[in-house]
Amino acid sequence: MSILSIYAFHFYNNLGTISAAGGGDDLEEKIVHVGDPVTLSCDVGDKVRVDSSEIKWTTYGDTVVKLVNATLTSDCGYEGRVQMSESIERGNVSLTIHRTVFNDYGEYECHYNKEHKKTWSLKITANIPKELTVTPGHPVWIPCYTREKTCTDNRRNADKGRTTNGTSFTWTKDNETVLQIVKGGRESKGRAQVSYDIDNGNLSLVFAQAYFSDRGNYSCTKQEDRTFLTLRVHQEEIKVSLEESEAFLSLRLYTVDPVNVYFQKDNSSTPVLVCGNYTCSQSWKYVESGHKVELDAVTRDDLGTYAVRDRSRDELLCTYIVSMAVLNGRHTQQSALVILIVFLLLILIIYCIFKECIEGEVI
């Protein structure tokens, strides 16, 4: 069964581009997909003495990387992602950004010995799908990005031991808030989590396990076009095979909404309600922490089909087919060996009895 693995997203289409303001005749533009590397060229036209020169790249006044007296430093969230040209001595002071992030967008200025040399407008593109389809129980990542530069305030606060996230945004599902971030404070009304990469403009919503109850239209307030995403979780038939020695059965419901769980022994029997509206009958129990139902003492009478249906919609969500495992090859070999040993013992006993009878007749 194929699923869309959200953690393996490749971003191919544009989410719009960023228009650079200002600049001069030297302004050039580059467009890259988020995650791809980019090189911004800058040639100062002179032979550069690395030990006595100052080379600096900035974005909106913040330092990206600088080379002063042969010492290279980077800042503003670019640490470990940028490098200077290997041909600096020949006047090539180009900047390469590896693993671009969404809020790398904007203008970049090249300075040599405090003199402005060149300006680049960097535009980052990403794909925001209109619809996602996932398998229940698998992770889902609903993308959202911001072009907001949080470098200056966030990095300085981080140096003082305060939160690094100064971004505020809200995720809604069907116009109801599911997660809200206000200047680093988090308010979540459920299982939703936020991307670990907020400082780099990634505000994506994450569910560690997709539930049927997660279906709906999602919107992120930082998305310029307020893209609505419809999360569809397809129905699934799940086979559960128990060993003869097992006496415990656990069925995940993959929803926080009220459901009915019906059991049917075979096609000719009538479905029986075993759990409904968070309450179970007989030896079944509902476990709220894991959103599942459990049976502690399984017998052969409990083998069959379990249907999980949404109570409000009377919609089939998933089906569990519970059966007893067929003996595997190893168990078959063990059983055959036991039978062979018993057979040989019987032959030996018969032989001994027969031998005693013959010896008795001779005597």
Image (spheres, helix red, strand yellow):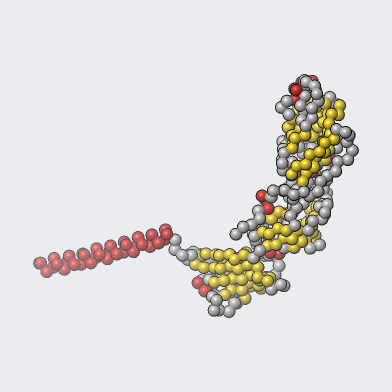
Q: Quadrant of residue 61?
A: top right
Outermost residue on the left side: it is 363
Quarter where residue 233 is shown: bottom right
Depth order, front residue of 321/342: 321
In the picture provided, is 111 more to the left or to the right than 36?
right
Q: Is residue 312 visible?
A: yes
Side of 122 relative to 206 (left or right): right
Instruction: Kindly identify the residue that appears in the image at 53 percent across and 71 percent down.
Output: 303
Quarter holding the C terminus is bottom left
| Residue at left offset 75%, top offset 22% | 89
Q: Is residue 69 visible?
A: no
Q: Residue at x 38, y 59 (%)?
A: 333
Number of numbered tags placed on the structure image? 0
Image-based side of 208 in relation to 241, left or right: right
- The N terminus, quarter of image: bottom right
Q: Is residue 362 above or below residue 50?
A: below
Q: Is residue 26 above or below residue 346?
A: above
Residue 60 placed where, x, y %? 85, 37
Look at the picture and state if 250 lies above or below 79: below
Report x, y in % for residue 264. 57, 75
Q: Relative to 290, say whether 15 is above or below.
A: above
Foreground pick, 182 / 195? 195
Q: Position of residue 289 (x, y in %)?
A: 67, 62
Q: Residue 204 location, x and y as percent? A: 75, 52
> Who's the residue at 84% across and 34% down the image?
119
